[in-house]
């Protein structure tokens, strides 16, 4: 089992300058304990995402860490000119010594897309995503290239920048359906899901089956990541106290933009209390023993091989977050 982190980089209530420094201090702790990957969301015009420009935040991560791999989960491709993004990706991969993990998607929020002037229609958004991805891959692998599409076109472009990892950094995608996992398998992408372990197992199995069918039985499929809220403290009661308080702030941030416009999130309202998240098997707050047992059970249920913990959320303080991460590294990870 590999260990990773997913972070909305959601606002805590602290002044923004302090917020960024606090988050980067926690990222340094991930590096110290040996976490493999750090994946951040991209959101706009909502307290759910303070890394609205993932590349800028990740450039700071690159300079503050040595071994930690990192990347967006995901770059919302329809919001970018693919050539501009390709150059940014190449720079990040070079600056980090080849530690970039490249998550891509079309974006989950039509409200955010509309604010950027993009057509939020699902079919248009998906087509734009696919064309943008093809241009990105060509830009990172070919010297001179063209691409003619319905939504994105470039002609006779000569790329000077290049990624350190060839032909490009590892690709990632968030998945929730068989169509998603088939697309991911066809493009040799690793996958992550924030759905419950019991609900996503069949999708992960379908992903591996699709991979074998496309690439051969002996070709190793990518990572299958299961996202979980994780809070560790010396006792179950202390961890639950922190998680219950902090989750209420995260919950308000998650729904902020949708409720502002009188709508609900694409995949429905999230549970309003952390205990409901625990009941749905999507998170845990407890002592190291409690957390370790929970993670083992969920990973087996999901048939996943990459645990992606959401360790910092809501108004969790720097001290609380660092203590949780330290305990996870010292007393939970060795048993995983």
Image (cartoon, grey):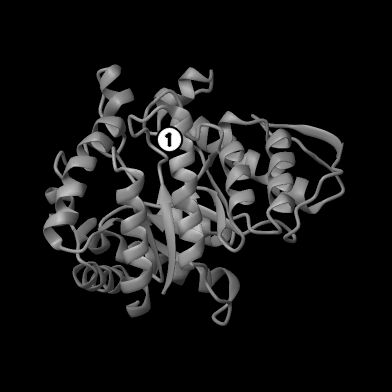
Q: Residue at x 62, y 31 (%)?
A: 80
Whether 250 is drawn above or below 331: the answer is above
Q: Nearer the viewer, residue 118 or 168?
A: 168
* Res 16 → quadrant: top left
Q: In this figure, which residue is indicated by the disc labeled 1?
A: 19
Q: Is residue 66 among what the camera can see?
A: yes
Q: Residue furthest bottom?
A: 218
Mark 1 element type: helix
**Residue 207 in picture, x, y percent from top left:** 44, 65
| Drawn side of residue 292 relative to residue 237, left or right | right
Residue 183 seen anywhere in this rendered image of the structure: no
Q: Residue at x 38, y 68 (%)?
A: 329
The image position of residue 145, as x and y in percent, is 84, 43
Of residues 268 and 256, which is closer to you in this image? 256
The C terminus, quarter of image: bottom left
Q: Is residue 220 left or right of residue 318?
A: right
Picture mark count: 1
**Front in this rendered view, residue 239 or 110:** 239
The residue at the far front in this view is: 319
Q: Is residue 186 above or below residue 208?
A: above
Residue 283, position in %: x, y?
23, 56
**For residue 325, which quarter of the picture?**
bottom left
Task: Bin the neighbour count of mark 1 within 10 Å (Cα to Cα): few under 14, some 14-19, many 20 and up.
Answer: some
Q: Which residue sits at x=77%, y=45%?
A: 139
The residue nearer to you, when weighing 224 against 17, is 17
Rendered location of residue 110, percent (x, y): 41, 27
Residue at 41% from the left image edge and 47% from the top image edge: 7
- Where, quadrant-wise, is the N terminus in this rendering? bottom left
């Amino acid at each position: 089992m590999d260990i990773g982190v997913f972070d909305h980089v959601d606002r805590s209530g602290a002044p923004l300058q302090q917020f960024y420094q606090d988050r980067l201090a926690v990222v340094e702790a991930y590096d110290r304990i040996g976490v493999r990957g750090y994946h951040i969301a991209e959101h706009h015009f909502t307290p759910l995402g303070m890394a609205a420009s993932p590349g800028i935040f990740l450039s700071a991560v690159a300079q503050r860490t040595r071994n930690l791999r990192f990347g967006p989960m995901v770059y919302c491709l329809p919001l970018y000119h693919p050539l501009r993004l390709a150059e940014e990706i190449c720079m990040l991969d070079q600056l980090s010594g080849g530690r970039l993990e490249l998550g891509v998607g079309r974006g989950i929020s039509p409200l955010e897309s509309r604010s950027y002037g993009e057509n939020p229609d699902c079919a248009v958004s998906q087509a734009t995503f696919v064309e943008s991805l093809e241009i990105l891959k060509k830009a990172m692998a070919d010297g001179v290239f063209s691409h003619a599409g319905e939504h994105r076109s470039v002609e006779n472009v000569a790329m000077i920048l290049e990624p350190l990892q060839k032909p490009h950094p590892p690709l990632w995608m968030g998945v929730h359906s068989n169509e998603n996992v088939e697309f991911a398998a066809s493009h040799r992408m690793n996958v992550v899901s924030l759905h419950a372990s019991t609900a996503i197992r069949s999708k992960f199995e379908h992903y591996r089956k699709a991979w074998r069918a496309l690439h051969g039985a002996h070709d190793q499929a990518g990572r299958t990541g299961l996202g979980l809220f994780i809070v560790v403290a010396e006792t179950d009661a202390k961890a639950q106290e922190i998680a219950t308080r902090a989750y209420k702030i995260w919950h308000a941030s998650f729904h902020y933009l949708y409720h502002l416009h009188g709508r609900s999130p694409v995949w429905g309202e999230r549970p309003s209390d952390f205990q409901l998240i625990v009941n749905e098997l999507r998170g845990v707050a407890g002592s190291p023993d409690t957390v370790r047992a929970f993670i083992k059970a969920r990973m087996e249920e999901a048939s996943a091989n990459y645990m992606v913990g959401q360790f910092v959320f809501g108004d969790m303080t720097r001290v609380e977050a660092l203590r949780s991460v330290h305990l996870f590294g010292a007393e939970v990870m060795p048993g995983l």
